[in-house]
Each structure stands twice: as structure tokens, then as C-alpha cells.
Amino acid sequence: MECPIPLVNSNIEQMKEYFETCKTIAVIGCSPNPTKDSNKVAKYLVEVGYDMIPVYPKEDEILGQKVYRSLVEIDRPVDMVVVFRKPEVVDMVADACIKRGDIKVLWTQIGIVNNEAAAKAKAAGIAVVQNYCAMVEHRVIFN
């Protein structure tokens, strides 16, 4: 399967601004398995000082944080959403971000591109990053 080209995306300067202004990051698809990329990225976000909120259909706690079943169930403000789910699920995630009204950035990890969802989020005033690893980009920008 070939990854489509992101038609809606942010540049490195914008990503830096997102990391500087966003404090609370929900990780959609955050696995409890420490060998999975979603767990490694979530752990990194905690280590560098973000308030990371895991979203996963099972488990009660991941990396010492309360797990939520969906983005809409989170009972506190969220600045950024990092997605580790298949591209077709991003449409529902974008809808949830728009519904919440507090999300500033929708970020999809490497290999995850959904231009329709990205355009919808952007039209609602949400910044979009597609097909980039949040951990890798943070390290590039700040280390």
C-alpha cells in the first residue's frame, strides 16, 4: 500500500510553534506494549514534559496515565492529538477534534495520510501535520 502525498500539511517552523504552545497531547491508539511505536512516542512526550493522555480501547492505565476510550471522553482540555490509527479512521478523529472545540493541532504519524480529514480539520481552524513522527520532529527541532 502506497502512502498518498499529504496535500494539507505544516512546515517545520509551524511544528516548532505547535510544540511550544501545546501542553496537553492525546495519543490516539496508544498501545500498552512498550515495543510499539505509539508507546515509545507517548513515553517520549511524557519524558520531555507534555501532559500525555493515552486513548486506547482497552487498559485502564498506560505509562502511568489514565486511559480514555475515545477523544470525546477526555474530561479536560486537549491541545494536540497525535494519531496512530489507519488513515480511514482519521476522518472520525477529525470530527471528534472539531466537536471538542479545544484541539489546536491534529497530527498523524508516518504513513498516515487522509487529505479529506485534514482539509476538514483545517477548515475548522485546526492545524494539521500529516505523515510525520511527533517524536522524531521534536528531537530534530529541540535537540
Image: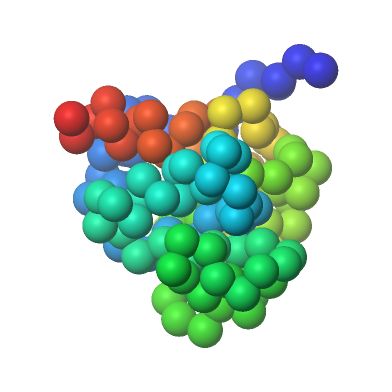
Q: Quadrant of residue 2?
A: top right
Considering depth in this image, is 60 or 13 the residue closer to the camera?
A: 60
In this view, 5 is above or below 54: above
Quarter placement of the C terminus: top left
Q: Position of residue 90 (x, y in %)?
A: 70, 48
Considering depth in this image, is 116 or 19 the residue closer to the camera?
A: 19
Q: Position of residue 53 (x, y in %)?
A: 48, 66
Q: Position of residue 54 (x, y in %)?
A: 54, 63
Considering depth in this image, is 31 or 76 the residue closer to the camera?
A: 31
Quarter placement of the N terminus: top right
- On the question of residue 131 being in view, the answer is yes
- On the question of residue 96 being in view, the answer is no
In this view, 57 is above or below 138: below
Q: Position of residue 48 (x, y in %)?
A: 25, 50
Residue lying farthest to the top in this orientation: 2
In the image, taking residue 138 as reference, residue 109 lies left or right, namely right
Q: Residue at 70% across / 45% down in the picture?
A: 85
In the image, taking residue 118 as reference, residue 15 lies left or right, namely left
In the image, taking residue 88 as reference, residue 15 lies left or right, namely left
Q: Residue at 76% across / 49% down in the picture?
A: 89
Residue lying farthest to the left in this orientation: 143
In the image, taking residue 139 as reference, residue 142 lies left or right, namely left
Residue lying farthest to the front in this orientation: 34
Q: Quadrant of residue 94?
A: bottom right
Q: Residue at 55% across / 71% down in the picture?
A: 61
Q: How is the image coloured?
A: rainbow
Q: Residue at 64% across / 27% down in the picture?
A: 111
Number of numbered discs: 0
